[in-house]
Amino acid sequence: MSLKGDAAMSCPIDEVGGEGATMEAIEHRLEEIPLRQVVELVRIDMPEEGMVPLLERGIVPGCRLCPIRRSPTGDPILMVDGVLIALRREMAKCMCVRFAEEEN
Amino acid sequence: MEHCGAATAERQPARPVGPGRGAPLVALVGPPNSGKSTLFNQLTGLRQKVANYPGVTVEKRLGRARLPDQRVVEVVDLPGVYGFSARSRDEQVTRDVLEGRATGLPAPEAVILVVDSTRLEPQLMLVEPVLSLGLPALLVLNMSDELEKRGGGVDAEALAERLGVEVVRANSRAGVGLDRVHRFLAGVLDGTVKPARPPRPFGGGPRRLELPVLDTYIERRNRIRRIGQEAGFTEPAPSPLTDRLDAIFLHRFLGPLIFFVVVALVFQAIFAWATPLMDGVEFLVASSGEWIRDRLPDGWLRSLLVDGIWMGVGSVIVFLPQILILFLFLGILEDSGYMARAAVIADRMMYRVGLQGRAFLPLLSAFACAVPAIMAARTVENERDRLATIFVAPFMTCSARLPVYALLIAAFVPERPLLGPFMGTRAATLLGLYLLGALAAIATAFLLKRTLLRGERTAFLMELPPYRVPTLRSLGLRLVDRSRIFLRRVGRVILTVTVVLWALMQFPTVDGAPPPIEESILGRIGHVIEPAIEPLGFDWRIGVGIISSLAAREVIVGTLGTIYGVEEASEGSIELQAALQRNLDLGGAVALLVFFAFALQCISTLAVVRRETAGWKWPLLQWAYMLTLAVGCAYLANRIF
């Protein structure tokens, strides 16, 4: 996907699972997730170049995130692998996640 | 291991290790906030040199590490990076140095990778590309004390085995682990340390850092996760203090409130605390100048030494108290971890005008002086945002403008209460000037982002480190470092320009003495430009003042004193104010204020912008833009008032 300009920050609509989809299969945007809820990153809807700051820090599809709080301006602050990371909410909109399964 | 056409890289030949070959170079690499620089300071003490990599603006930090057996190793502290994709200059330079392509530096013979062990797995993302260089390597797990205190842990031996590299647990703040690092460096000198043998498939090739794609990152992350598990890495519990403090500092209402209080405090410190120190410096310079004057024979040489060079030195040193206080506060804010939170709060505001949260720190500094502010702009990662920050920084009302403002306001604005006892007309005018500068900055940033620096919105990722208590040692070293940079980079320029201006005022001599100002070269220049500045309400005297303040803005007060024949000229001098009132009308005074608010008259700023943007294009563009704006608005002001 190579979207240019400000359009790079908007995302396609959520794909909703078909009939009988379980909760784990439904994707949400990170932005919508309630605080202190652990989720798993499914994909990042951004041009590859824009993703690199996330990837370099090990925030890749498959890793676990947990929104901890919101900044005074409404941007999410996540805990990932023991690191607190602040993102702009435009970026959080592009991160598709699903609720994490129980740890065994 | 795959071979990646390493033949195409231009390399400096590797220096053979051995006696009489000069000290080998070891590179310190790692993510930001990993304590890498603390380790560097522990290794090198004050035996450091800071310069620029040629052609770019990234700082080269070189030092000599003296081992217990008195042998010496050169260490280069590379910029903190998360990767080598060369999106930023910091990454480009780090790559170049590691691959042996940096001019002026030999290829490093070994590399020390420093990571924060409390955030181990994400930070190990750098391990693969670094190890793939095939150099002898040491992995330093820093902050290991904190790791254990928070209930985490890792088996260093198992990690070493999995990664194929020697691993050391360390706490650089306390010097723990330093002996192991020394032992590694001794091994490099002896040639006994073997190159890292990373397990496949780490890719890359000898001395090449490959450019990964999405899948590479995913695989890498999974590999690191597996290695972490096998090495028994337990994540430390989140610091409860950090969580509690964040609940306050990032609170919806308290957060911004505390932010403004902190900003006001830093402001106040720069202005209130610095003033007595600056007065002290000025007094010392003036009295020692007199002492020198008394001991030298009369003549232009004496004048050169005292009025030119010594005063020039004085006008450089007088900046130091403010710079020191500013960087002390910035150091405390940054080392404690609060700065990251402040950048988050400021980000959305700055995002609206096309800048980003990290630009807030440099722009705040610009209220003291644009020179360190522009140096601080390096923290802005994206090139376009950084250029925009550098470009608008001089609009922030720097402290050098204050004497000029104070003089003109005292001369032309009668003091009357405006907001009851809280604010009078004079303070309101000053505040208005501050706002004018800030508005011009915002408008310019906006304009830049639509025209010259157009580009996609960048990702803003701010890592919020756990709150820590800053150490005196790191604060002290930071202050020494910044002062050295300032004195060296800027001092030279101010001194040169001061001497040049001295010459312009000194010659042509009349009977061996300096001429009256109208007949000096400077005066003649003033007369020449007079027709150009008359529409602004200025005459040649003001013209002379403006030119002379190119060295440093506040110099105009002294120069105006000379021009009007006022002894002991200062902004509080009633005589000087009266002289100005005779010479300027209200329109001209407002025009002069506006001119000073907008014009880039500071040679030092130009010099630093040139350094930071590696060329003359940007400083000249900046100068021309600001001059046009200044002249235009001054003209308007003169017409209106």
Image (cartoon, rainbow, N blue to C red):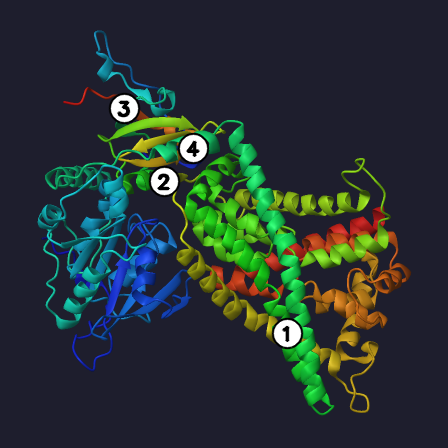
Question: Which residue is under mark 4?
Answer: B246
Separation of marks 4 and 3 at Cα, in angstroms: 22 Å
Is B46 situated left or right of B234 in this image? right
> Dot 3, how many residues are within 10 Å of its Cα: few (below 14), some (14-19), or many (20+)?
many
Residue furthest top as drawn? A19
User: Which residue type carries mark 1?
Assistant: Gly
User: Which residue type carries mark 4?
Assistant: Asp
Label 1 secondary element: helix
Separation of marks 1 and 2 at Cα, in angstroms: 44 Å
The chain to which mark 4 is attached is B
> Mark 4 against mark 3, which lies toward the viewer?
4
Most foreground residue, B22 or A47: B22
The chain to which mark 3 is attached is A
Q: Do circles 1 and 4 both sit on a common chain? A: yes
Residue B227 % position (x, y): 13, 41
Is the C-beta separation of discs 1 and 2 under 8 Å?
A: no
The chain to which mark 2 is attached is B
Question: Which residue is under mark 2?
Answer: B466
> Mark 2 against mark 3, which lies toward the viewer?
2
Please tell me which residue is depicted at 18% across the width and 80% down the height of the picture: B19
> Mark 1 against mark 4, which lies toward the viewer?
4
Residue A33, placed above or below residue B636: above
User: Which residue type carries mark 2?
Assistant: Pro
